[in-house]
């Protein structure tokens, strides 16, 4: 122990003596370890961190499977009841689902997201309430009988200012008074790690929370997550086998809904398995890119240690001459390496904390209760420590073994070989690999950044400038269709009176809300050859004046107030719909429907310009519009075109008009359409941020790696450089020799990287928008940038080699009887060309 402390003290003094070397090594290690630790914290959140409940290892989630187990689905309420009542492997089986709710309290109206849960939800999880109680069995037996609610600790603080007498107070949910019976403990946010609800209500209140829903009585409505607690001694495999028997029984009893279904038990916590697998794959790709193999991950610090060891040859030789064993030298050098890596690990933890905070602060541009809770818990800290320790041993071992066997006589004389240093194919190969991989990542990042730039300049089929949107859902307020239609008409009458508003309209689904689906289309007069061959189109409902408000070109006529339920059935289609379904003829006057060839048809009265509906990168898709007042939709968005360049000022006025009509109406997603564009741009920005960050990290590490190799070259060729200078070689000659060697490796890496980058870019086709995977501007710019960085990394050690002049000028006596034994005619020329 005493000798280890001395090694640590000695190592610390050595590191302090070389602050530049120590700083570079620490920064390199901190970047690498910090990135890996941040990525592992995501994996820990998804896979390793247990839910904050009693004995989480006993919980399993019950998924249904389809198509011989290739697809997953959640459960219907009636199937859940059968699983709950027929099984003998769970001590308790509960269900839950997400739902938006209109919440009003203390003159504050909001749409929030909560859980509809079975009455045994909290009992199954085994958590105690912070205040009050949880649901009783009788509160979840009869539909619409017990309007009670449990709120989260965060909701209690936010909405009720942590008042202690909260139990028994009322909260208006969907225009219905609910009695608050309890508060969950601090830190509990339900059973999904990426979702933060505010309110829990019993399943039996589904008709109030989701007006018009029928899933309580429908066996084919797969909309519930089901989680069970295993009985003591029951394994997951045994429980799955028992549920499979029940699933087979349900398939025989209800073949229409359950035939061919299977069952699978998985760990709960991240929505559906597809999302969990995507997160794991994404994390694996990032961590794999950071590692690029153990050798590439530790190369930069190792080359710096090799260079330092070359400089310490005399010191190590003296220690050997005084009796130090090789094992003692290896331990000392590895101790220094581990000290460096642990220091880098501490810096990496700070970087990981910053990255986690950055990711956690990112909010989806939507009102979904989505949360990214990345923490440095004991699992992540252990991972960081182990990675730091193994990294120190890995990058310190080889230099320690190489430098612990010095050639005593030359080393004690401080002599360095004329040949410079032993060339290492592994070392040179790693330089080439680092440059190639850096180029691949930089090209991919460049393509995504270019895509983001193009996407930001793209017009999505409407003009987002000087326009605003506000969303509201009358269904959550309990409005009937008649009352809701009257309310919507009043909104359109009042909106133009708001100062600054030029025109206004209502739309069922705002473009680029990621909420569009397609329906099959039947064109009048065209034969039906099979359901799989029918064309698809995106439906929407709009009020009159929508196209003018959104500045969407339209030919034909717009809808009018006369297009009511009693009027003829009319529709407007987009250009793609007209060209594909009515090829070679005018679409206006044509008729179609989406209910079946024997159902009434809709007459096309106008053709609107194409647009983007779900994503900016999608191909042009057929779409059609129907009059809102013929086809009532309780959830609608009010869009308004403003006459001012400051559209934000109109939002408050429009909100006030809505609240004058209904003071309890929650208005959500109130924003300018320019801000709305951040939703479809979010994937591009995230990809650009992730790839760009790792691209910057890659170029830094590539520069440090090349610098480390060239420093090692210079350290090994010091005497050779001195001889060349003594024989007349100029500084530029010496610099050329050093840079030629480094740039040769860099150029090989660039060529290999270009080939790999072109192949990798083909995998980004679905991510790119408006940019070719082989974009020459990106490839050329990134190649020039990386080549410039490599040249600079070679230049700095090359200039340091000029310090060898004094060695050649004062300490070396040379008698040359034959041409200087340089490595080539080119080298003889640049060594001074001396003959004696």
Image: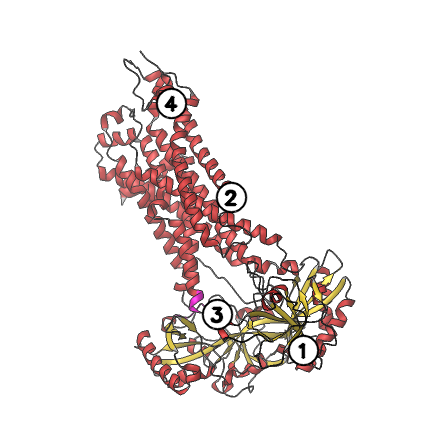
Alpha-carbon span between mark 4 and mark 1:
91 Å
Alpha-carbon span between mark 3 and mark 4:
66 Å
- 177 in relation to 827, above or below: below
Mark carried by residue 804: 4
Q: Are marks 3 and 2 in contact (CB under 8 Å)?
A: no
Depth check: 240 or 806 in front? 240
Depth check: 61 or 9 in front? 61
* Front label number (1 vs 2): 1
Q: Label 2: how many residues lie within 10 Å, few (<14), some (14-19) or many (20+)?
A: few
Nearest to N terminus: mark 3 or mark 2: 3
Nearest to N terminus: mark 2 or mark 4: 2
Q: Secondary structure at mark 3?
A: loop
Q: Secondary structure at mark 2?
A: helix
Q: Position of residue 75 (x, y in %)?
A: 44, 78
* Front label number (3 vs 4): 4
Nearest to N terminus: mark 3 or mark 4: 3
Mark carried by residue 569: 1
On screen, residue 523 versus residue 222, left or right, reads right
Name the residue rendered at 49%, 57% in the picture: 766
Magenta highlight on residue 679: no
Q: Position of residue 653 (x, y in %)?
A: 74, 65
* Front label number (4 vs 1): 1
Residue span colored magenta:
267-275
């Amino acid at each position: 122990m005493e000798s280890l402390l001395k090694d640590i003290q000695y190592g610390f003094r050595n590191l302090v003596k070389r602050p530049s070397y120590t700083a570079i090594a620490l920064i390199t290690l901190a970047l690498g370890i910090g990135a890996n630790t941040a990525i592992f914290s995501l994996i820990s959140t998804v896979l390793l961190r247990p839910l904050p409940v009693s004995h989480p290892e006993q919980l399993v989630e019950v998924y249904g499977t389809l198509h011989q187990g290739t697809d997953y689905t959640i459960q219907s309420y009636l199937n859940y009841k059968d699983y709950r009542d027929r099984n003998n492997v769970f001590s308790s089986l509960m269900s839950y689902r997400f739902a938006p709710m209109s919440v009003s309290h203390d003159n504050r109206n909001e749409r929030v997201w909560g859980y509809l849960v079975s009455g045994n939800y909290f009992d199954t999880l085994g958590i105690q309430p912070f205040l009050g109680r949880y649901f009783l069995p009788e509160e979840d037996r009869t539909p619409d009988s017990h309007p009670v609610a449990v709120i989260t600790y965060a909701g209690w603080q936010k909405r009720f200012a942590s008042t202690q007498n909260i139990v028994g107070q009322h909260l208006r949910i969907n225009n219905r008074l609910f009695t608050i019976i309890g508060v969950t403990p601090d830190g509990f946010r339900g059973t999904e790690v990426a979702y933060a609800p505010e309110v829990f209500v019993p399943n039996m209140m589904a008709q109030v929370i989701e007006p018009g829903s029928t899933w309580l009585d429908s066996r084919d409505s797969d909309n519930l997550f089901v989680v069970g607690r295993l009985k003591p001694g029951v394994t997951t495999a045994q429980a799955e086998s028992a549920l499979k028997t029940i699933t087979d029984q349900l398939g025989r009893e209800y073949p229409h809904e359950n035939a061919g279904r299977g069952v699978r038990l998985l760990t709960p916590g991240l929505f559906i398995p597809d999302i969990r697998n995507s997160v794991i794959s994404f994390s694996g790709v990032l961590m794999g890119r950071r590692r690029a193999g153990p050798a590439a991950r530790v190369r930069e610090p190792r080359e710096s240690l090799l260079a330092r060891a070359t400089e310490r040859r005399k010191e190590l030789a003296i220690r050997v001459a005084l009796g130090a064993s090789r094992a003692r030298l290896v331990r000392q050098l590895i101790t220094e390496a581990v000290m460096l890596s642990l220091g880098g690990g501490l810096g990496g933890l700070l970087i990981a904390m910053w990255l986690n905070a950055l990711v956690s602060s990112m909010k989806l541009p939507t009102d979904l209760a989505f949360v990214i809770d990345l923490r440095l818990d004991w699992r992540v800290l252990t991972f960081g420590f182990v990675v730091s320790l193994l990294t120190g041993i890995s990058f310190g071992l080889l230099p320690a073994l190489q430098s612990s066997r010095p050639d005593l006589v030359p080393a004690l004389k401080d002599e360095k070989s004329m040949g410079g240093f032993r060339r290492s194919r592994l070392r040179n190969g790693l330089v080439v690999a680092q440059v190639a991989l850096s180029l691949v990542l930089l090209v991919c990042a460049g393509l995504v950044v270019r895509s983001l730039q193009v996407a930001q300049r793209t017009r999505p089929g409407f003009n987002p400038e000087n326009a605003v949107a506000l969303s509201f859902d009358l269904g959550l307020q309990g409005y009937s269709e008649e009352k809701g239609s009257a309310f919507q008409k009043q909104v359109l009458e009042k909106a133009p009176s708001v100062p600054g508003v030029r025109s206004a309209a209502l739309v069922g689904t705002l473009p680029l809300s990621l909420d569009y689906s397609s329906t099959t289309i039947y064109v009048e007069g065209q034969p039906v050859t099979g359901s799989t061959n029918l064309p698809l189109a995106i439906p929407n409902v709009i009020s009159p004046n929508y196209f003018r408000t959104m500045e969407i070109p339209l030919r034909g006529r717009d809808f009018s107030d006369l297009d009511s339920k009693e009027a003829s059935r009319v529709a407007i289609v987009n250009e793609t719909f007209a060209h594909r379904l009515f090829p070679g003829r005018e679409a206006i006057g044509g008729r179609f429907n989406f209910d079946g060839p024997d159902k009434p048809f809709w007459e096309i009265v106008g053709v609107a310009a194409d647009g983007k509906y779900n994503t900016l990168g999608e191909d042009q898709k057929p779409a059609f519009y129907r009059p809102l007042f013929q086809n009532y939709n309780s959830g609608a968005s009010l869009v308004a075109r403003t006459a001012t360049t400051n559209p934000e000022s109109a939002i408050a006025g429009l909100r006030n008009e809505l609240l004058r009509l209904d003071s309890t109406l929650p208005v959500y997603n109130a924003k300018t359409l320019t801000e709305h564009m951040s939703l479809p741009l979010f994937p591009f920005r995230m990809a650009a941020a992730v790839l760009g960050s790792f691209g910057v990290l890659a170029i830094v590490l590539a520069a440090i790696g090349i610098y480390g190799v060239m420093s090692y070259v210079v350290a090994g060729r010091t005497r050779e450089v001195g001889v060349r200078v003594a024989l007349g070689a100029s500084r530029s000659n010496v610099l050329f020799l050093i840079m030629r060697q480094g740039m040769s490796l860099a150029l090989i890496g660039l060529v290999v990287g270009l080939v790999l980058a072109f192949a990798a870019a083909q995998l980004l086709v679905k991510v790119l928008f408006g940019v070719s995977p082989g974009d020459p501007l990106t490839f050329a710019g990134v190649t020039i940038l990386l080549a410039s960085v490599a040249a600079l990394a070679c230049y700095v050690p090359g200039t340091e080699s000029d310090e060898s002049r004094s060695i050649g000028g004062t300490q070396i006596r040379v008698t040359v009887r034959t041409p200087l034994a340089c490595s080539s005619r080119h080298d003889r020329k640049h060594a001074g060309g001396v003959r004696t």
